[in-house]
Image (spheres, helix red, strand yellow):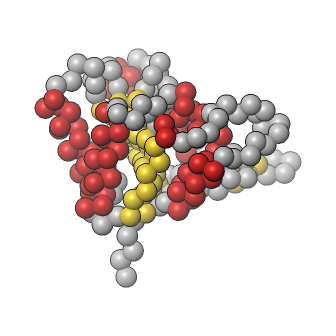
């Protein structure tokens, strides 16, 4: 029996009308056409405080929107993160979403009297689709791709999500309508192949 792949798309741009939203929607269209089940999290539409005010010292209650988002993440086989790169990193709202949700006991668990941890999101794969205002080779070679290292290695792989593949889209600020159409078609095709 062929079970449809379950995909959750997380749009990390703080402006809903951004090109990142168009990329997330293109991936969703392709995935649905390819037979996947799709859920979408648009972080900008969620009602939550992005500030982990007490660090890990005292647990904050998760707002209803964060509880629903976590259910979508736990449900998925494949996570697709769409976000711009700002100052080499993630938008603050997206970083706050991760800080508030990827918590000990939810996404990972430290072992007692050990430097090691349990990865509670094992069995999932991911793709990062990130938009840039510079050539991707410069972002990789000159700056060391900090947003990818943070999201891929220090967050997703730390919690057991593997493999995590990356698609770079850009240069956005100088792009033509034709280039944007080509990027949307490329991302839609990734969705159709459920990758």
Instruction: Name the quadrant of the C terminus.
Output: bottom left
Front one among 43 and 79 = 43
Left or right, 183 with respect to 94, comes to left
Q: Position of residue 140 (x, y in %)?
A: 39, 25
Q: Is residue 32 visible?
A: yes
Q: Position of residue 51 (x, y in %)?
A: 67, 31
Q: Position of residue 133 (x, y in %)?
A: 33, 21
**Residue at the extreme bottom:** 1
Q: How many marks on residues?
A: 0
Left or right: 170, with 140 as reference point: left
Q: Determine which quarter of the picture holds residue 184.
A: top left
Residue 168: image x %, image y %? 33, 34
Q: Residue at x 74, y 31 (%)?
A: 53
Vertical placement of 57 versus 73: above or below? above
Residue at 21 percent across and 24 percent down: it is 175
The single residue placed furthest to the right in the displayed view is 113
Q: Is residue 185 above or below residue 175?
A: below
Residue drawn at x 45%, y 22% is 86
149 on left or right of 3: right
Q: Quadrant of residue 54?
A: top right
Query: Which quadrant holds the N terminus?
Result: bottom left
- Is 123 placed left or right of 103 in the picture? left
Q: Quick check: can you spot residue 160?
A: no
Question: Residue at the spot x=31%, y=33% of the render?
Answer: 19
């Amino acid at each position: 029996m062929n079970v449809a792949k379950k995909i959750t798309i997380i749009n990390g741009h703080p402006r809903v009308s951004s090109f990142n939203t168009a990329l997330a929607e293109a991936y969703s269209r392709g995935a649905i056409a390819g037979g996947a089940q799709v859920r979408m999290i648009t972080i900008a539409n969620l009602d939550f405080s992005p500030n982990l005010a007490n660090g890990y010292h005292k647990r904050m209650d998760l707002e209803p929107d964060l509880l629903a988002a976590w259910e979508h993440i736990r449900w998925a086989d494949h996570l697709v993160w769409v976000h711009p790169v700002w100052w080499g990193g993630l938008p603050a709202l997206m970083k706050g979403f991760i800080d508030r949700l990827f918590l000990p006991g939810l996404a990972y668990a430290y072992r007692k009297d050990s430097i090691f941890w349990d990865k509670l999101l094992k069995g999932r794969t991911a793709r990062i689709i990130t938009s840039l205002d510079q050539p991707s080779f410069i972002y990789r070679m000159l700056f060391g791709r900090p947003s990818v290292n943070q999201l891929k290695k220090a967050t997703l792989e730390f919690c057991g999500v593997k493999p995590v593949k990356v698609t770079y889209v850009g240069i956005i600020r100088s792009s033509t309508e034709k280039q944007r159409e080509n990027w949307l078609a490329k991302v839609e095709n990734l969705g159709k192949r459920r990758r």
